[in-house]
């Protein structure tokens, strides 16, 4: 989410894809380092380095992608870019809903994430057509992201 916001705000100043991707990557990397830094130094230890390294690796991939997705949503001149940008954002929350429901059994969190996954494309798209296409993209991206990200993470943590 933070990388998406970084790309959406930075695209006003630059439209260079490399800068937008780097901004997204640095944003996500900073979040991971901040979280695990606090766990290590603020809470007395984080344990194994496996999860911080895995999460940092994921941030290096997801950060640039979501930075570009935010820029595409905000300033995309072609409909497909705006649809993919919002679909990625909806898919992020949709995959989180699936993780909360299927793996963690947190029904309340799953409901809220699913509501955001539906609301984001519907509220942020510019046209009715873009709303429905973005919602469809989110519906496709949600289980894909769950399968590609959360299932392997669940295997590592088991």
Image (tube, grey):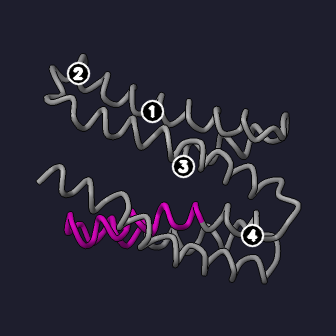
- Identify which residue, 103 or 156, lies in the foreground: 156
Q: Check whether the beta carbons of the residues at disc 2 and disc 3 lie within 8 A of each other.
A: no
User: Which disc is residue 31 wearing?
Assistant: 1
Real-space CA distance between mark 4 and mark 1, rounded to the nearest whole angstrom: 27 Å
* Element type where label 4 sits in the image: loop
Real-space CA distance between mark 1 and mark 3, rounded to the nearest whole angstrom: 11 Å
Real-space CA distance between mark 1 and mark 2, rounded to the nearest whole angstrom: 14 Å
Q: Considering only order in the chain, which callout, 3 or 1, is on the residue closer to the N terminus?
A: 3
Q: Is residue 67 left or right of residue 142?
A: right
Residue 95, by quadrant, is bottom left
Q: Is residue 112 magenta?
A: yes
Residue farthest right in this picture: 77
Residue at the image position 66 percent from the left and 64 percent from the top: 86
Q: Considering only order in the chain, which callout, 3 or 2, is on the residue closer to the N terminus?
A: 3
**What percent of the width, then of the height, locates residue 72?**
75, 55
* Element type where label 1 sits in the image: helix
Range shown magenta: 88-113
As displayed, is residue 37 above or below residue 5?
above
Q: Is residue 135 left or right of residue 36?
A: right
- The dominant secondary structure in magenta is helix
Q: Considering only order in the chain, which callout, 2 or 4, is on the residue closer to the N terminus?
A: 2
Q: Is residue 29 magenta?
A: no
- What residue is pinned by disc 3? 1
* Element type where label 2 sits in the image: helix
Q: Considering only order in the chain, which callout, 3 or 4, is on the residue closer to the N terminus?
A: 3
- What residue is pinned by disc 2? 40
Residue at the image position 52 percent from the left and 78 percent from the top: 139
């Amino acid at each position: 989410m933070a990388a998406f916001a970084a790309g959406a705000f930075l695209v006003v100043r630059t439209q260079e894809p490399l800068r937008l991707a780097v901004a997204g990557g640095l944003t996500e990397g900073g979040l991971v380092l901040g979280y695990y830094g606090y766990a290590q130094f603020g809470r007395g230890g984080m344990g194994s380095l496996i999860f911080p390294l895995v999460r940092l690796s994921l941030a290096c991939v997801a950060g640039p992608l979501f930075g570009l997705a935010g820029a595409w949503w905000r300033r995309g001149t072609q409909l497909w870019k705006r649809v993919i940008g919002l679909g990625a954002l909806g898919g992020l929350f949709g995959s989180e809903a699936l993780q909360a429901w299927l793996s963690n059994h947190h029904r309340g969190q799953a409901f809220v994430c699913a509501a955001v996954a539906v609301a984001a494309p519907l509220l942020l798209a510019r046209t009715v057509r873009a709303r429905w296409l973005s919602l469809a993209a989110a519906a496709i991206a949600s289980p894909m992201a769950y399968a590609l990200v959360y299932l392997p993470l669940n295997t590592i943590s088991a």
